[in-house]
Image (cartoon, rainbow, N blue to C red):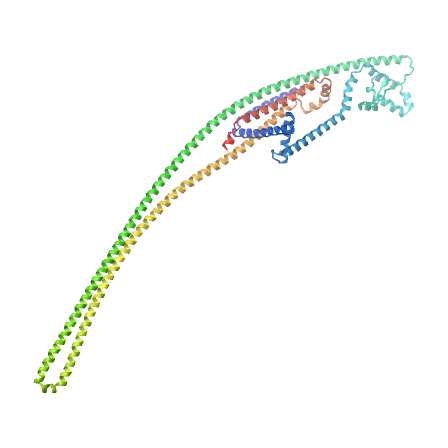
Amino acid sequence: MTGKATGRASAKCSDTHSMFSVGTVRTVDREKLRDKARQFQMKESLRLAMCARIQQQLKKSPKAAEELASEVLKVLQQRGLPPDVSNDALAVLVHELSTRRSEQLALAAAATKAAGPEDRSDDRVPLQNKASGRRLSGSKDLSSRSRGKSGEKQQKGPHSRGTSDSRISSGDAVTDEDVYLTQSQLQQMSTGFRLPPRVSPKKDKNNGIWEEIVKFSSVEEQLEAKRKQEAKLRQRAELAERLSAQVNQKQERSANERQASEMYHRENMQRLSELEDDERRNEQQRLEKAKQLIQIQNEQRLTKMKQHEREQQTKKAQEAKMAELLRKQKEDDQAKELARREREQERLRLVSLENQRQLEQKRQEKERERELEIRLAGDYIKTEDAKEAARKKQLEDMASNIKAKMKFFDDTSKAGTDAKARDEEQRVRRAQEEYAKQQGDAERKKKADAEASSRAQQEFLRQQMVEKKARDAAAKRDLNKQAELWTHERVDAERRERLALQQRAVRNTAQQEVLRQQMRDKERRLLEADQTALEVQLNASILDRIHKHTGSAQANGAVVVSETQHRSRELQEKEETFLQRRPSRSTAKL
């Protein structure tokens, strides 16, 4: 009853766990399932590749190659080695694993052989229990005889007492009324070496009342032993029937759990397919939106590039036009300057000619004045010579006075002529200086005007260049801002993508751990016994005896355990196969 209650509690607990597991799996993220499928697929591909290598290189059977492949991958993972080891290293590792397995099998065989005598002694117990009542009556007869002759045994001493005790203790092993086995003989029998039995000497006994009493008591003991044997057999049959019922209940519960697991697996498969379809649709929509956004950004980029090219062409045309205007203006200024210089040179040439003409006129006037003065002086001399005859005496008297007057007159005329010449030269010099001053002022003014115009033109050009540079800088700043915005958007998108990948990896790891724990719990629940530990301990000896004599219950139990383990492995393989069949779109996406 306790076993049945425990079975109901365990079944109810398993149903509760299955409900919790269903509720948990409903919240499973599809990314975690993809990651788990990818990991299982990688492990399975590695195992299959290693199995194929072992079959091809080492000529192993498929079953042995599959077992060795799993063990080899486990050993390589423990040692931190890559799975693509060389053929020699693989052969050495497989030889090492095979040697270790053979040693373990040899040790197990030795342990089984060492435990054999005890098992054989245990096997002999039912045979001894199934022996005839004569064996029991013989043992009882020996005990009654020992009790009847206690006085003689007390007189014989402690040695005889020890002998009788050893006979009494080995009474259960006696196989006949007059044949008995000691403990040493039992040990010899357990090792396969047996001495001939010792036969007790027959004594001459009278058929008295005590012999009849002994026979009657032996018959009663035989009947009692038979009744006990029948009761024990009935009890064993009841226990076997009860255990068979429990095994059948376990099988039915396992079948129900298997059906529930299959139903749960089908529901999960359908739910996962729906989630996969939803994810595919969402992924398609996201890709379409991303393509549209990329197309819009490309169009905006092309529009900006075309606008920038148009602005560059317009700026180049304006700069070329401005350079042409500056070139023409420079050529005009140079032509004007050349014409001005030519006019100035012509004017200076004319002024020089006019000055030479005036100087020539002045020189001629001076020559005429000098000739006039010379003529007047000659006329005066002639007049004086004419008068000299008339005034010969006056000349002599006034000779000194006339000479003095003539000398004074000559000095005065010469000083006036020199003064006039000096005045004329000073006037001409002043006129030339005034003209040169006016020309210099005009030249300086014109030069200052030209420089002012050039400076104004240069300032205008400089302002245009500054404005052009400002426009270029503004356009460059706009482009840099747009590039920075795109860069920030790209960096943010990459950061969000990395964060999403990290979170997805964490969720996948957590979900994998949850699924592994659920699988371990489920397998542990499937492999658990329907009885408590105390019941198993109390029923251990009974179960062992029943299993040894009947064999059916043990076979059924082994079948149940093997079926449970096989079903657990089958469900796990189905889940792995389903996860492997799912397309690893997350890998392609990454």
Seen at 59% across and 25% down, the residue is 573
**Residue 395 figure quarter:** bottom left
Seen at 36% across and 47% down, the residue is 469
453 left or right, relative to 475 = left
Asked if 469 appears above or below 185 in the picture, the reply is: below
Asked if 47 appears above or below 396 in the picture, the reply is: above
Seen at 39% across and 42% down, the residue is 479
Residue 20: x %, y % from top left: 56, 25
Task: Give the camera-side residue of 336 and 474.
Answer: 336
Asked if 88 appears above or below 533 in the picture, the reply is: below
25 left or right, relative to 182 = left
Is any atom of residue 441 visible in this view? yes
Residue 219: x %, y % from top left: 83, 12
Task: Give the camera-side residue of 154 and 125.
Answer: 125
Number of marks in the rendered image: 0
Residue 458: x %, y % from top left: 31, 52
Asked if 426 appears above or below 380 in the picture, the reply is: above
Which image quadrant: the N terminus? Answer: top right
Task: Give the camera-side residue of 292 and 386.
Answer: 386
**Residue 130 figure quarter:** top right
Residue 587: x %, y % from top left: 52, 31
**Residue 7 figure quarter:** top right
Is any atom of residue 20 visible in this view? no
Task: Give the camera-side residue of 290 and 528.
Answer: 290
